[in-house]
Every structure is written in structure tokens, then in C-alpha cells.
Amino acid sequence: MSFSLHEKEDTIVALATPQGVGAIAVIRLSGKDAIKITNRIFKGKDLEKQASHTIHFGTIRDGDKIIDEVLASVFVAPKSFTKENVVEISTHGSSYIVNQVIKLLVRHGARPAKPGEFTQRAFLHGQFDLAQAEAVADLIHSDSETSHQAAMNQMRGGFSSEIQKLRNELIHFASMIELELDFGEEDVEFANRNDLKVLVEKLLRAVELLISSFDLGNVIKNGVPTVIAGKPNAGKSTLLNALLNEEKAIVSEIAGTTRDFIEDEINIGGVIFRFIDTAGLRETTDIIEAIGVSRTQEKMKTASLILYLFDLTDTDMVEINRDINRLENQGVPFIKVANKIDKASPDFVRELKAKYPDTIFISAGQKDNLEVLKSRILELVNLDKFRTGNTIVTNIRHYDSLVKTRHSLLDVLEGLDRQITNDFLAMDIRRSLHYLGEITGEITTDDLLANIFSKFCIGK
């Protein structure tokens, strides 16, 4: 999605609230003629004579025909989201009314907005940088406290200021190296190589810290993939249903009922967990069930957390020891969850507690001790960095640019050690600056902007 110069001068219009019937709908216009175009169909005060950030009651009319009674909010450039003239028309939430008003505005000179065009205009007019613009989309789609907080921090410039600080420190040395190139024949040194090495090493540590935060950021943004694994009939589907408070998975006394995995999201303590109920782990001659078991093993390898669930009435210590050894070798964090505590032998429970004191004892069917299990799940998700306000990378594009920055900075260090010529050293530094600039939009292309903003909803 790219825009011609003419399109960037257009006044655009779109529905800013979700499609469908509701109490109200908000139609947004932005552009040089936004107020003028609205004024042509608005019967009330003369909107072109009103101050910015004011709301006015009136009617929308097509000639003598009244379409609706509305509130028109006026934002005069540059004091608006896009830094252009903006009008937001609050109508009743009928899809018929919305369509009639938008058609009327288009007839009077507006153009239907493309996906993300309002936010793109805000970026192009310097309202915020590219990383902050992307955070707008993340904020809209945030569905937990942590994802909302991460998006809000990025939108308010927390991540951008971190990147800008790194870039500014490197720009000074880049300019000194470039200056040396201009005086190449005079053998002068404006950039102290030891100071440059110290700076690059410092930048590398900061970049690597941001890169390492992406695993946590990805969890915050997309949820923690959590696999419920165990033998058939251990109670995996019952546990998923109990956590969800709905009958999502089929529960049966017949072993091997779950042939494929069932997935749903649960918000625990402001964090989204993607719980995956899997086929029971066992040897089987059933071809379909065997495929399910194979998929379970694959899911376990890619999970961030495994709930190892076993039935206290149908599992002995030999099986539990074997399964725990396998899980420890797999390297994925796991919680030992003993099910059917209400039916278990007290002696076996005491034996298990003595050997594995961190076991959580529950009854999925009776929903006993589920809150204890949820607390343990939260403990294993390390959100300490996030809660202390450290910058967290949540965007794969930013992560990719940071990885490229790290490679370029390592090239700078290698060049310093090998005492390469200034032109090659300058090239490596410029490349590092380029990748950092890609994150905030100081270095960008039309294709990159088109790819980013095309993922936004129309009206944002």
C-alpha cells in the first residue's frame, strides 16, 4: 500500500468504530478539507468558525432529508492525531446510517481511507516515529494487562528513546570517521579508536539485552504456549475445561478420546496463556491416535511451559520417575500436577510429597486447588524485567533489525582489531546506524511503510 502525492493531499473518511449495530458509531475524516466537507452536510453551527477540540450538536442532511442527529467533534490542525484538520462524527450505530453518511461525505469530496492511513499520516507528519505507530496497532489488539502495558510503553516512546539514545551515541563517532576521510592525506585522527571500541562494546551489550528480551516480549504479545501432557485418561481435558469454565474438550472414560490438540486462551494474573490439551502419551496401534501422540510430542518441544498431569489412582512411582526424567531432558519448564487427589491413597500422596515436594495436588473434576496451580504457573513466567519498567521488544521487525545491528557492530569491533582503513570502518558504522534507523523510521522505504500500515484496520 503506497500513496501518490495527490492521495496524501486528499481528505479521507472511514468508520473508526467496529462494524455492526451499536449505540453509536464514529466516522472520522482527516485532511485539509475535513471541516469544510463536513460543514456542507452538517446543519448546526458553522464548523469552520469553531475552535479546535470542541463538540457540536446538529443534523446530517442530504438536501432537505435528515439522515441523523449527530455530534461533530472538531480538531483543527496541527492539534489532532494526524496533525491535519480532523472531524469525528458520532452517529447512531445503525449500519444504514453509517453507510449513508459516508456515501454523502464521499460525494462532497472525501475519499475512503485505506487500512492504516490515519496512523500513516500521523507518522508522516511527525506525530510519532514508526515504532510508536506500530504500537498503536498493538494497543488496539492488546487483550491482557501485560500486552496493554507493553504497547502503551512503546507508544509513549519508551522503546524509541532507547533506540534513539544508542543511535545518537554512534552518530558522533560516525561523523568523526567521515571527517577523517576528508583529511585522508593529512593523517589526522578525530575519532579516538579506544573510545570508539568502548562505545561499540557498550552498544553491543545494550542491543543484546534488547534482543534477549524478545522471548519475553513475544510471550506478552502472543500468549504463553502451555501444553497439558500426560497419559490417556489422566484428566487433561477435564483440567482444560475447569480452567476455561466451559466444556471445550470432550471428556470420556474411553482412553484416547483426544486425537488432536485443542487450544484456547486463559488470562491468569494479566498474562494470556494459550493452553493446549493434547492426545494422551502412550504406545498405540490406532493410526489416528498415533498421529495425535506424535503431534503432542512436537507441541511439547515448542511449548514455553508444560503441565505434566498424572492420575494418582492410576500411576505408580516408576512411571512418574520415568516421565519426569524425560521432561527434564527435554529442557522445557514443567509443573508436576497430580490429579484426583479426592480419590487418592493417603500413603501414595505422602510418598509423592516426600520425593517431589513441588508437586501440585488437584482435583480437576471437583475444581480443587486450581488457584494454587494458577499461582505456580504465574511464578514460572518471568515478568520481573517487565514489571520493573525495562524496555521489552515485542515486534519481530524490531527484533530482526536489532540482530542485524548486532552483526554490524561486531564487524566494527573486528575492523578495529584488524585496523582496517577508515572507509571500511565507516561503512560498518553506517550499516549499524541504518538498521537502528529502520526501527524508528528514520531510515525507511515506501515498501516497508506499505507493509506495516496495510496490517492496520481501516479507520485507524
Image (cartoon, rainbow, N blue to C red):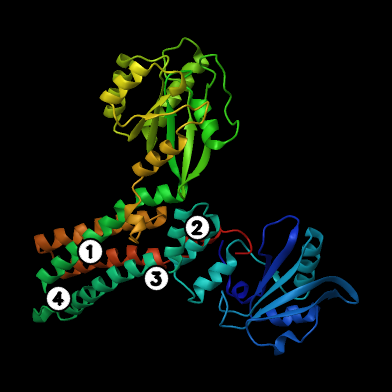
Tag on residue 191? 4
Mark pair 3, 1: CA separation: 19 Å
Judge depth for marks 3 and 1 and give the one in front.
1
* Marked residue nearer the N-terminal end (4 or 1): 4
Tag on residue 442? 3
Tell me: 41 left or right of 459.
Answer: right
Tell me: 158 left or right of 77.
Answer: left
Decide which of 425, 13 is in the foreground and name it: 13
Mark pair 4, 1: CA separation: 17 Å
Tag on residue 203? 1
C-beta proximity under 8 Å, tags 3 and 1: no
Mark pair 2, 4: CA separation: 41 Å
* Marked residue nearer the N-terminal end (2 or 3): 2
Residue 256 drawn above or below residue 102? above
Residue depicted at x 35% and y 48%? 215
C-beta proximity under 8 Å, tags 4 and 1: no
Residue 64 image-quadrant placement: bottom right
According to the picture, the residue beneath numbered tag 2 turns out to be 138
Tell me: 153 left or right of 201.
Answer: right
Type of amino acid at the residue the image marks with label 2: Asp
Residue 265 drawn above or below residue 70? above
User: x, y percentage for residue 26?
Assistant: 70, 67
Decide which of 94, 188 is in the foreground and name it: 94
Decide which of 105, 49 is in the foreground and name it: 49
User: x, y percentage for residue 418?
Assistant: 10, 60
User: x, y percentage for residue 231?
Assistant: 43, 19
Mark pair 2, 3: CA separation: 21 Å
Residue depicted at x 74% and y 75%? 71
Mark pair 2, 1: CA separation: 27 Å
Q: Residue furthest right?
A: 64
Name the quadrant of the N terminus.
Answer: bottom right
